[in-house]
Amino acid sequence: MILVPVKDLRHAKQRLAPMLDQTARTQLAQAMLEDVLSALVEWRDRPPIALVTRDSFALTLASRFDLEVIVDHANTSETDAISMATHICEMRKVEDTLVIPADIPLIAADEVRQIYEAAPARGSVLVPAGDGRGTNAALRRPAGLFPLRFGNDSFAPHLEAGRATGLPCVVLKLAGIGADVDNPEDLKQLIDAPGQRKSQQLARQWKLSESPAATSE
């Protein structure tokens, strides 16, 4: 199962505050989530997808894309949300889990397919963020093979945990999945990247290169 954790988008992307006010940051987070889900459903042979959330916009998108929702009543952290959802998957005897964040709008369906093609019969696949510090995709087989702890420097601990299982831990570097949007430099890279994703179109309308002031439109 593919798990997409989504916290409260009304307070999303605080590190973009130097460039965007909260209204704009929420709009961007919503657009990025829609880009991620659009890419995931494009792969017809994909496993089932579940959003782990209680956010109202995410729930609307789940309905639109006909995706399952695992309600995150606590809404405390991505780590806690995935721990809860993983437990549910284990109870259902789900074979594996692939965690995909909601802020990697350049993700491509073919990259998701590559993760599953690279996955060992038992073991894990990790996709680092572009800076090598964070983890932008994590497949575990079986579903709860090791705990996931997300944060700015999660990749090294995840790699250590994956290897500590004694099972294969594959590392893939994938450009689209690796391009998360957390800070102003990431946002500029999203704007400059080829493509017409919803988040790109939105950010380009703000013409951030023309003015350093926070934007809301």
Image (cartoon, rainbow, N blue to C red):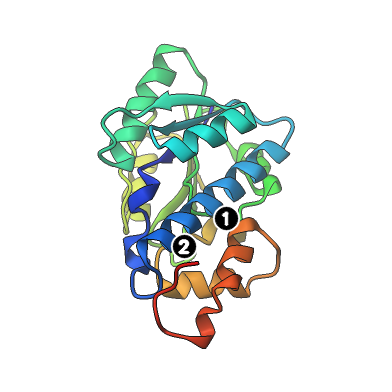
Q: If the image is split into quadrants, where does the N terminus sit? A: top right
**Camera-side residue of 22 and 135:** 22
**Camera-side residue of 38 and 208:** 208
* Position of residue 165 measured from the top left corner of the image (x, y, whole percent): 36, 34
For the residues bearing labels 2 and 1, Cβ distance under 8 angstroms: yes
* Position of residue 80 measured from the top left corner of the image (x, y, whole percent): 28, 35
Res. 159 visible in picture: no
Res. 108 visible in picture: yes
Looking at this view, name the residue that lies furthest to the bottom: 210
* Position of residue 79 measured from the top left corner of the image (x, y, whole percent): 31, 40
Could you say whether the residue bearing mark 1 is in a helix, strand or loop? loop
Residue named by callout 2: 181
Q: Is residue 173 left or right of residue 161?
A: right
Residue at image point 66% right, 51% down:
108
Q: CA distance from mark 2 to mark 1?
A: 8 Å
Residue named by callout 1: 105
Seen in the picture, residue 183 relative to 151 is either above or below; the reply is below
Could you say whether the residue bearing mark 2 is in a helix, strand or loop? loop
Tell me the crowding category of disc 1: few under 14, some 14 to 19, or many 20 or more residues within 10 angstroms, Cα based: many
Residue at image point 28% right, 41% down:
77
Query: Label 2 sits on what residue type?
Result: Val
